[in-house]
Image: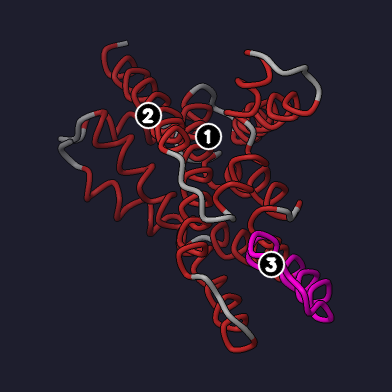
Amino acid sequence: MTGFFAIYRREMLSLWVSPLAWVLTFVFLLLQGASFAWMVSHFGNMTDLSIDRGPVQAYFGQSIFLIVTLLLICPALTMRLFAEERRSGTIEALLTAPVTPAGVVVGKYAATLTTYVLMWAPTLLYIVILRNTGHVDWLVVAASYVGVLGTGASYLSVGLLMSAMTRSQLLAFLLTSLVVFGLFIIGVGEYIFEPGPFREICAHVSVLTQMEEFSKGVVDARRLVYFATMIVLPLFITSRVVESWRWG
């Protein structure tokens, strides 16, 4: 992956020097702050909580704000990665540089994933606040963040592929949103279909079920395999697309 670090530094600088990352971080923390405030208000007067229904479970596994955040933030982070370079013509200079397609793809992806992780980092303060007011199971917290990281990493990989498919940032945003929302709708089928293969498939894809499991401290190897597939496959296809530009 020749050129990975150069591409990574370039993309990190592009993200954080422009207003994009700062605006998205502000919107992200605003939504997460609203979710946390609702959680504190809901559980503030409750004295009898079961082991699998507490503030941490509510924040990570039962909040609609998490789903809305992923539907907005991940497409917005990835929409410009290739689409803007193709529109402005800078992709030609990048492809003639001593970098491999895999280095370009993974470098761009790693920069957006790092930004995604940095956006989530301040939410650790919420857990610190909860720790000061009661007991916090750190294994459950760790599992919840594994779910957040895996889900976001999957959607960012899909967004990178969609950005490589078009020259328009807006179209890339819409395509990524449609794919992510489509996966969400497929997951809803878990509550529609009768028990059987279709319901099992829907439950496996469902982000709601995934986050509910992780928020209870359950780390299923099948979920990790799903995340790995959703990350690696789009990245592989994107690298082939980028390589086709060099020879086409």
Which residue bears the numbered disc 3? 54
The disc at residue 235 is 2
Proximity of marks 3 and 2: CB atoms separated by less than 8 Å? no
233 vs 149: above or below: above
Left or right position of 154 against 241: right
Which label lies toward us, 3 or 2? 3
> How many numbered marks, from 0 up?
3
- Residues at marks 3 and 2, CA–CA distance in whole angstroms: 37 Å
Q: Which residues are magenta?
A: 34-57
132 vs 234: above or below: below
Left or right position of 131 against 229: right
Query: Considering the image in quadrants, where does the N terminus appear?
Result: top left
Query: Considering the image in quadrants, where does the C terminus appear?
Result: top left
Is 51 inside the magenta-drawn segment? Answer: yes
Marks 1 and 2, the one that precedes in the sequence? 1
On the image, the x and y values in percent for residue 72 come to: 67, 46
Residue, x 81% and y 23% (percent of image)? 192
On the image, the x and y values in percent for residue 76 come to: 60, 45
Nearest to the observer: residue 58 or residue 241: 58
